[in-house]
Image (cartoon, rainbow, N blue to C red):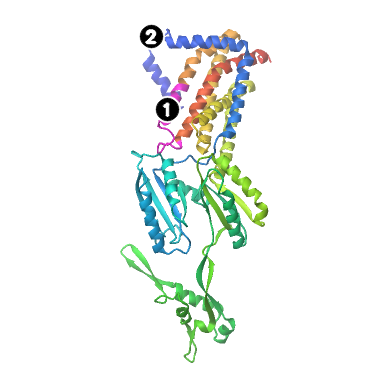
Amino acid sequence: LVIALTVTPVLAYYLLSGKKSITQESFISRKLKSIHGRNLNYLISHPWISVGGVAVLMLGAVILLPRLDRTFLPEFNEGTLTVEVFMPIDSALTASSEVGARIERSLITIPGVESVARRTGRAEGDEHAEGVHYSEFDVSIDTETESLSRTGIESAVRTKMDEFDQVFYNIGQPISHRIDHMLTGVRADAAVILYGPDLAELQYGVHLIRQSLIDVEGVVDLRAETSPEAPEIKIALYHDALSRYGISPAEATRNLDILLAGEKVGFVQEGNRFFDIILKLDGDRRSIDALNSIILKHLPSGQPVTVDMIADVYETRGPYEIKRTNGSRRMGVQFNIDGRASTDVMAEVRSIVEAKTDELNGMRFEISGRLKEGEDANKKVLMLAMISVLLIGLSLYFSYRSLLITLQILINIPIAFIGAILGLWITNTPMSIATMVGLIALTGIASRNGILMISHMNHIIESEGRAFSMETVMHGALERLIPVLMTASTAALALLPILITGSEAPGKEILFPVAVVITGGLISSTAIDLGLTPVLYYHIQKRFRKL
């Protein structure tokens, strides 16, 4: 805008001064104006044809809109699959590693798979707090010579994983995997989360929901979060014995914590690295006999007070982990969506879960995932879009001082949405936050064509002294035909490289939906605006011009 207002006039003055103006139009320009002139003459004489045609197209777009799939972000093509594998919770590291090695050998045989890397358990300081029953595989895809598409390779991976018994798995991609975990707390496209105070009821609930969702078309990688029991050793203090030996429960608990878990007493520096010094008992103290022999205190008589004298140490089983959200215990059933529109899958999942409400014994549920996050984000973007349209309308009104002209220009926005929605449907592109951004950008672009045409018609009537008539309106519309086509075509051609590369090109996943929306909107707004704006302008001005 700054360049157009400052640099362009200066360059035009110096570069175009003394140049002979070109008055003869090209053959293409004359032909386009001839065809458009005949069509425009007919449309102005029969206004209900153009108005009715646009109304039918808008109705078709409204009907088509709910049929579009919805998601939060477009699916990324990262060139790598992330396969999470969950073995039984009490699996040893050696068993997990052995099964992981077998899975590696199986996955590497899939055509198009370049390499497979595995991590079992977690390293020291790892942010992923998973046990040794958990393994994560990074499956690199050869994007240049792959014999299968990415979705085909995903299907092949699922086929291979189904060959392993007692193994649950989840397939995603590295970035998408982290985004899902950050947004919803689960590493999957969607999840049904149950909240309740009782772990047994939560386990029953997630099992019930998992069984109900097994046969839902489009649901894959279905896994229920559980809280299986793991062996543990409990130390139950005898309060009478503690009083007899002059030990408080807090003192006994703290001493046991220090002796078993250790306590930081200092640090050692080696170069730029610091290492904590932890003081604790040596050797393995996880057996009952070893715990019973720990000396907590010496009496004045010199008699040692051991753990077995003040506590009952015994083996039991308890929950391996308890997950909470805002203080409430929770468990969930997570799954991915493949082969079906996510909106249809989530609608069926919601209806199934709602039908099971009576069997959930008062537990509340929440359906989370990309789709829910996308709906929340779209509401915010929609509010911003309404503010944008309002600001455009106010600026147009203060410029033209006419509510009718303002509304006539703003009607180009829903007209542009016709092409945008049709473009999404043709390219099978889901509605996402990227398409919403494209629609917001389209509101300003679509208004431009109407501004160009109506401003020129006002100019030739008010500044050039032409009388208002059908011929004057047609003259102004034909003079603006080439500029309108040029501005729209240059904008569309600028987006052509993104459209050609497609939505699966790495790095273009978010740009492609934006390009589809803007290009489709430009086509519909330009094609319809050239016929509708002169018709509306003529008949509205003819009726209200004297008012």
Looking at the picture, does residue 258 appear above or below residue 114?
below
Q: Nearer the viewer, residue 535 or 145?
A: 145
* Type of the residue with mark 2: Lys
In percent of width and height, residue 210 lies at 57, 52
In percent of width and height, residue 441 lies at 51, 31
**Range of magenta residues:** 488-510
In percent of width and height, residue 14 lies at 37, 17
The answer to whether mark 1 and mark 2 are in CB contact below 8 A is no
Name the residue located 60 percent from the left edge and 21 percent from the top edge.
54
Q: How many marks?
A: 2
Q: Which label's residue is closer to the chain start, 1 or 2?
A: 2
Residue 268 visible: yes
Front position among marks 1 and 2:
1
Residue 122 visible: no
Q: CA distance from mark 1 to mark 2?
A: 35 Å
Residue denoted by label 2: 20
Q: Is residue 513 a member of the stretch shown in magenta? A: no
Looking at the picture, does residue 521 appear above or below residue 354?
above
Q: Is residue 497 a member of the stretch shown in magenta? A: yes
* Type of the residue with mark 1: Leu
Q: Secondary structure at mark 1?
A: helix
Name the residue located 54 percent from the left edge and 13 percent from the top edge.
477
Q: Nearer the viewer, residue 129 or 222?
A: 222
Looking at the rendering, which quadrant does residue 351 occupy? top right
Neighbour tally class for label 1: few under 14, some 14-19, many 20 plus, Cα within 10 Å: some
Neighbour tally class for label 2: few under 14, some 14-19, many 20 plus, Cα within 10 Å: few
Looking at the rendering, which quadrant does residue 544 occupy? top right
In percent of width and height, residue 526 lies at 52, 21
Q: Nearer the viewer, residue 486 or 192?
A: 192
Looking at the picture, does residue 1 appear above or below residue 223?
above
Residue denoted by label 1: 496
